[in-house]
């Protein structure tokens, strides 16, 4: 088995190819890890969620970590870890363009909303909706790959 470091280009390619990641956040010294669906573009991971533990914790501490992996044949794998910052994309004046951008990226996949638990409705039916669009700004990333030796 050979393990090598992935280039930044290889890391971004892996992020762009996949939709499922593990998000780690922390509050009061306690870590919390959950799977999320995401879309990667312009150095951000865009996602959607209902308000709950994950969103509450990221609001309290915006420093997060994302891990994406890809399994190959046998024991082969690739993994990318992103350190980043949570940014909520509220539904109010001044945030329309970035929120629409998140919607357009995520909605390219027919089931993008399922992990959030409730599909948003267009047009909005009220000023207060129970879902949150957010993005993670990539501060730094690194990746590794394990390959079988011949």
Image (cartoon, rainbow, N blue to C red):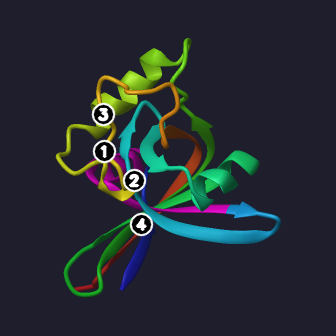
Could you tell me if the residues under marks 1 and 2 are in contact, i.e. CB atoms within 8 Å?
Answer: yes
Q: Please report the bounds of the magenta region as a residue range.
A: 9-25
Q: Residue 143, percent across and down?
A: 47, 61
Q: Residues within 10 Å of mark 2 (few under 14, many from 20)?
A: some
Upstream in sequence: badge 4 or badge 3: 4
Residue 146's place in the image compared with 103, above or below, is below
Image point (20%, 38%), residue name: 108
Dot 4, how many residues are within 10 Å of its Cα: few (below 14), some (14-19), or many (20+)?
Answer: some
Please report contact status of discs 2 and 4: CB closer than 8 Å, yes or no. no
Most distant residue in the front direction: 126
Viewer-nearest of labels 4 and 3?
Answer: 3
Residue denoted by label 3: 121
Q: CA distance from mark 1 to mark 2?
A: 8 Å
Return the residue nearer the eye: 99 or 51: 51
**Labels 1 & 3 near each other (Cβ < 8 A):** yes
Q: Which residue is mark 1?
A: 119
| Alpha carbon separation for disc pair 3 and 2 | 13 Å
Query: Counting residues from the N terminus, which is met first, the one under dot 2 or under dot 4?
Result: 4
Write down the residue under mark 2.
116
Q: Quadrant of the N terminus?
A: bottom left
Closest to the observer, 46 or 95: 95
Q: Nearer the viewer, mark 1 or mark 4?
A: 1
Residue 46, x across and y down, in percent: 43, 40
Residue 142: image location, x then y, percent = 52, 56
Q: Looking at the image, do the residues carrying marks 1 and 4 touch, with CB atoms under 8 Å apart?
A: no
Residue 79 visible, this orientation: yes
Q: Position of residue 105 (x, y in %)?
A: 30, 34
In space, the residues marked 2 and 4 are separated at their CA atoms by 24 Å
Kindly report the distance in space between the C-alpha atoms of the residues bearing marks 1 and 4. Answer: 30 Å
Q: Is residue 50 left or right of residue 83?
A: left
Residue placed under numbered mark 4 in the picture: 79
């Amino acid at each position: 088995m050979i393990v090598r470091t992935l280039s930044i280009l290889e890391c971004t390619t892996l992020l762009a190819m996949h939709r499922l990641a593990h998000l780690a956040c922390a509050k009061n010294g306690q870590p919390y890890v959950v799977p999320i669906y995401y879309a990667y573009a312009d150095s951000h991971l865009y996602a959607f969620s209902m308000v709950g533990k994950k969103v509450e914790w990221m609001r309290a501490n915006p420093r997060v970590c994302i891990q994406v992996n890809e399994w190959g044949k046998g024991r082969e794998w690739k993994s990318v870890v992103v350190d980043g910052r949570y940014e909520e994309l509220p539904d109010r004046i001044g945030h329309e363009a970035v929120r629409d951008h998140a919607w357009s990226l995520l909605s390219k996949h027919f089931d993008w909303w399922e992990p959030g638990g409730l599909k948003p409705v267009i047009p909005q039916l009220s000023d207060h909706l129970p879902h949150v669009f957010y993005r993670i700004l990539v501060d730094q990333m690194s990746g590794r790959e394990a390959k079988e030796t011949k």
